[in-house]
Amino acid sequence: MRDPYEVLGVQRSASAATIRSAYRKLAKKHHPDNNKNDPKAAARFAEINTANEIVGDEDKRKQFDRGEIDAEGKPRFQGFPGGGAGGRAGPGGGFE
């Protein structure tokens, strides 16, 4: 999915009220019931809803801005805890 800010047409610094307003306008414009002859209307509407679920929710918005979740709201890989040793045994713990 595209960047949720881009989907809603707002800047990253937009207020919650601006995001809410942009979402409502786009949802009304692209709702499948208002675009019965457009086969892509449902997909656009779903994309708008997903974008709003992320940037319209304060906690998810912060997670997205920090790079913790992607544009679909799924967690991004953050690596293994402790950094790991690359799978190689160190001195005294190796194989003989």
Image (cartoon, grey):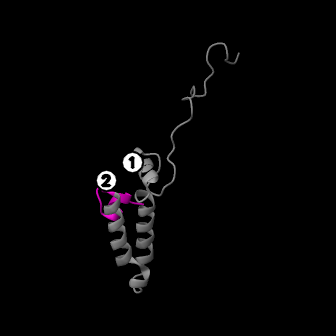
Could you say which quadrant of the image residue 41 lies in?
Answer: bottom left
Q: Position of residue 76 (x, y in %)?
A: 49, 47
The residue identified by callout 1 is 65
Residue beneath the point at 45% across and 76% down: 42
Q: Earlier in the sequence, mark 1 or mark 2?
A: 2
The amino acid type of the residue labelled 2 equals Arg
The residue identified by callout 2 is 12
Total residue callouts:
2
Q: Nearer the viewer, residue 16 or 88?
A: 16
Marks 1/2: CA–CA distance: 9 Å
Image position of 88 with respect to 18: above or below: above
Residue beneath the point at 34% across and 64% down: 8
Could you say which quadrant of the image residue 84 lies in?
Answer: top right
Residue beneath the point at 36% across and 68% down: 23
Residue beneath the point at 53% across and 37% down: 79
> In terms of secondary structure, where does tag 2 sit?
loop
Q: Quadrant of the C terminus?
A: top right
Q: Position of residue 72 (x, y in %)?
A: 47, 58
- What secondary structure prevails in the magenta region? loop
Mark identifier at residue 9: none
In this orientation, does residue 35 appear? no
Q: Position of residue 37 (x, y in %)?
A: 40, 86
Q: Is residue 11 left or right of residue 38?
A: left
- Mark 1 near mark 2, Cβ–Cβ under 8 Å? yes
